[in-house]
Amino acid sequence: MTPPPNTAADCAADRCPYADELVDRIAAEVGRSAAREFFAMLGVDVQKPAEVEEFRRDLRFAGFLRRHTDKAIGGVITAIALGALALLWGGAQLVMGGPKP
């Protein structure tokens, strides 16, 4: 499907500066409207800087918590694995007649 030819005298056959400016303005307004609606669904009024800053702090804290939780889970898994290995080692020593407690 080909677009209709531009009828303005200063428009080239494939490009019209008036249309480009109009499309840019429409796209900018649609983007702003979509962003406002998206943040409204999250409970943030983008017209209030205090709410936006609180939302940013919440995101930073969630990231901090996630990173440190990942590290803590790794530490717990390591501790459990080392405990299991210690039990196996102690059991193997008892079975083989090693030092008795």
Image (tube, rainbow, N blue to C red):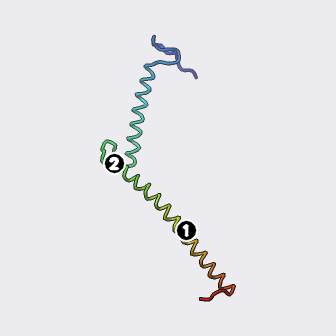
- Check the image and report above or below for 26 versus 45: above
Point out the residue furthest to the right here. Answer: 96
Residue identified by numbered label 2: 53
The kind of residue tagged 2 is Glu
Q: Quote the CA–CA distance across marks 1 and 2.
A: 36 Å
The residue at 39%/32% (across/down) is 29
Could you classify mark 2 by the number of other residues whose Cα lies within 10 Å: few (under 14), some (14-19), or many (20 or more)? few
Q: Nearer the viewer, mark 1 or mark 2?
A: 1
- Check the image and report above or below for 64 versus 99: above
Q: Secondary structure at mark 2?
A: helix
Point out the residue furthest to the top here. Answer: 9
Task: Name the foreground residue: 84 vs 35.
Answer: 84
The residue at 57%/75% (across/down) is 83
The kind of residue tagged 1 is Ile
The residue at 47%/13% (across/down) is 7
Residue identified by numbered label 1: 77
* Quarter of image, res 91: bottom right
Task: Name the foreground residue: 60 vs 40.
Answer: 60
- Check the image and report above or below for 67 versus 80: above
Does the CB distance between marks 1 and 2 fall below 8 Å? no
Q: Position of residue 52 (x, y in %)?
A: 34, 46
Q: Earlier in the sequence, mark 1 or mark 2?
A: 2
Could you classify mark 1 by the number of other residues whose Cα lies within 10 Å: few (under 14), some (14-19), or many (20 or more)? few
The residue at 41%/39% (across/down) is 34
